[in-house]
Amino acid sequence: QLQASGGGLVQAGGSLRLSCAASGLTSDLGAIGWFRQAPGKEREGVSCISSSGGHTYYADSVKGRFTISRDNAKNTVYLQMNSLKPEDTAVYYCAAKRGLLCGGTWPNKGVYAYWGQGTQVTVSS
């Protein structure tokens, strides 16, 4: 199971840190991705981190503002979100791949095997 948490309401320019805690499938845990879905929009890939944490990827819209990291001892992946904008408002989901690497297909939600339940992030202007 994947459990996403840390969402909330924040003013534009503020910060939040999301957490994605894994349990029950850690022996199969590979690369982890963060996605978000705003009302009426498709779920989009935000970031991905490889199993070792050595490779990270970001959508252009969040590059330079968001940082993904992981603590494998705690089976947890984090998404530090700084300089938040109203357009970052969405439900954020974490997802796990069976593979160790994100690869070029990381923004494709179809390549992820496990999903968390989502956490709401609302950025007010």
Image: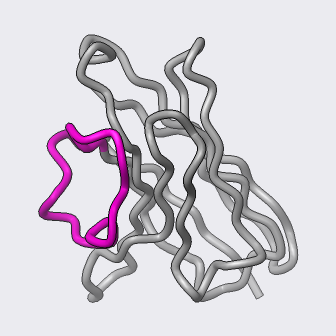
Residue 44: give x, y in percent of width and height: 35, 76
From this viewpoint, is residue 114 visible? yes
Nearer the observer, 74 or 101 = 101
Relative to 92, is 24 above or below? Answer: above
Query: Residue at point 37% right, 43% down?
Result: 31
Report the predominant secondary structure element of the magenta stretch. loop
Residue 117: give x, y in percent of width and height: 30, 43
From this viewpoint, is residue 6 visible? no
Colour scheme employed for the rendering of this structure:
one colour
Q: Does the magenta run of residues contain 58?
A: no
Q: Is residue 57 left or right of residue 44?
A: right
- The quadrant the N terminus occupies is top left
Query: Residue at point 50% right, 20% down?
Result: 75
- The quadrant the C terminus occupies is bottom right
Give, as a single range, the part of the protein colored magenta: 96-114
Q: Is residue 35 left or right of residue 59?
A: left
